[in-house]
Amino acid sequence: MNEDYEYPYPSPELASEHPFITYEHERLTEDVMLDRSERFYEEMNRRRSIRMFSSDPVPQKLIETAVKTASTAPSGAHKQPWTFVATQDPEIKRKIRVAAEKEEEKNYLENRMNKEWQEALAPLGTDHHKEFLEIAPWIVVLFEQRYEIRPDGKTLKNYYVKESVGTAAGLFIAALHHMGLATLTHTPSPMKFLNKILNRPENERPFVLFPVGYPLEGVKVPDLKRKDLPEIFTTVL
Ligand code: IYR
């Protein structure tokens, strides 16, 4: 251990000031790694964003475990600058739908999204109707904590908030898919109304809204293709 390192981590001084533990890691054979990597890719490649959900209920425990998985994401200075707010209350979901559709009407019908933007969206066929916000059993809103408010009222900076929260969002989506649920990354912009409806403090800003549930049986999705590896990957050797 550490044989190649002139400056081992943690240094003896660091280790005397802050606790460190040994990272438990099981080294797999390359065959096993190859198999696991392909199976995981194939599973993730079956994920799709869903715009019609079943109203079948989903146990809260599943949402909680997906949030715990999301919260394993790395974050700037390990601040975990996120709050997941989940509701299955029909009245709150209705309020969110009404407010989201009001914003989306401006986006779509009053051209707050310009022509280029609307053309880019055309293959997805989205519009200002957001019925899924009432029908999906859960709405989970991921808030970013722009800064931290300590119990004594003192404020502290958070770092790389967007990067951290975006990473947590990705893990949340993967966790839901892995447990057999579906979601949509919905951004009914601007989303400030979510602070009011969900009673969130001023240091929090909505990052993305996830309707969560089972896909409606037979639901259709756009026949999108994902980019092939050479379009998204290159090497510099
Ligand atoms: N927020 C709108 C518009 C929208 C924007 C993008 I970029 C999308 O990929 C999909 C939709 C809406 O939710 O309809």
Image (cartoon, rainbow, N blue to C red):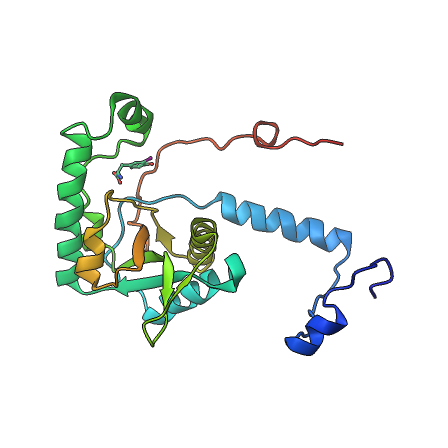
Residue under the point 43% across and 49% down: 162
The front one of 190 and 57 is 190
Q: Position of residue 5 (x, y in %)?
A: 82, 59
Q: Position of residue 173 (x, y in %)?
A: 42, 53
Q: Position of residue 100 (x, y in %)?
A: 18, 46
- Height in image: 231 above or below 86? above
Residue under the point 49% across and 33% down: 226
Quarter of the image containing the C terminus?
top right
- Height in image: 8 above or below 30? below
Quarter of the image containing the N terminus?
bottom right
236 vs 108, left or right, is right
Q: Position of residue 99 (x, y in %)?
A: 14, 49
Query: Quarter-wise, where is residue 55 in the image?
Result: bottom left
Residue 211 appears in view: no
105 vs 49, left or right, is left
Query: Quarter-wise, where is residue 234 in the image?
Result: top right
Query: Quarter-wise, where is residue 205 in the image?
Result: bottom left
Residue under the point 23% across and 64% down: 88
Quadrant of picture, ligand 1: top left
212 vs 45, left or right, is left
Check the image and name the residue furthest to the right. 3
Check the image and name the residue furthest to the front. 154
Count of marks overlaid on the render: 0
The front one of 182 and 236 is 236
Residue 1 appears in view: yes
- Height in image: 225 above or below 78? above
208 vs 68, left or right, is left
The front one of 137 and 187 is 187
The front one of 54 and 144 is 144
